[in-house]
Amino acid sequence: MSTDPWPDIAGKIEDGVHRLPIRVYYEDTDFSGAVYHANYLKFCERGRSDCLRLLGVHHHELHWHETEGRMGFVVRRMQC
């Protein structure tokens, strides 16, 4: 097991893959102890936000870009 600290709370990007450790709390689970299915959406959104942060893209840039006009990042579909 590696004891190297993560360089940032936003995770890290290695070999083109964003890795984000997420602690799953009891409140995130259902009565059986499995992660409640709707909570996967918030974990995915947290990962998306942190990946963009590591790439240097800030949320305000997704709404308006001075030379490019409107920009956006839309989650069109999720499937599991």
Image (cartoon, helix red, strand yellow):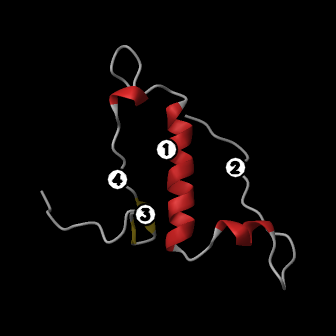
Q: Position of residue 59 (x, y in %)?
A: 67, 65
Residue at numbered disc 1: 43
Type of amino acid at the residue the image marks with label 1 = Phe
- Cα gap from disc 2 to disc 1, whole angstroms: 14 Å
Pointer 2 local density, CA inside 10 Å: few below 14, some 14–19, many at least 20: few
- Cα gap from disc 3 to disc 2, whole angstroms: 19 Å
Type of amino acid at the residue the image marks with label 3 = Ala
Q: In the displayed orientation, state which residue is furthest to the top.
A: 31
Q: Residue at x 35, y 37 (%)?
A: 24
**Earlier-in-chain disc, 4 versus 2:** 4
Pointer 1 local density, CA inside 10 Å: few below 14, some 14–19, many at least 20: some
Q: Are marks 2 and 1 in contact (CB under 8 Å)?
A: no
Q: Nearer the viewer, mark 2 or mark 1?
A: 1
Quadrant location of the C terminus in the rendered image: top right
**Earlier-in-chain disc, 2 versus 1:** 1
Element at badge 3?
A: loop
Element at badge 4?
A: loop
Pointer 4 local density, CA inside 10 Å: few below 14, some 14–19, many at least 20: few
Q: Nearer the viewer, mark 4 or mark 2?
A: 4
**Earlier-in-chain disc, 3 versus 2:** 3
Residue at numbered disc 2: 75
Q: Residue at x 57, y 67 (%)?
A: 52
- Cα gap from disc 4 to disc 3, whole angstroms: 9 Å
Type of amino acid at the residue the image marks with label 2 = Val
Residue at numbered disc 3: 10
**Earlier-in-chain disc, 4 versus 3:** 3
Rendered image: mark on residue 21: 4
Q: Are marks 4 and 2 in contact (CB under 8 Å)?
A: no
Q: Are marks 4 and 3 in contact (CB under 8 Å)?
A: no
Quadrant of the image occupied by residue 30: top left
Q: Is residue 51 left or right of residue 1?
A: right
**Earlier-in-chain disc, 1 versus 4:** 4
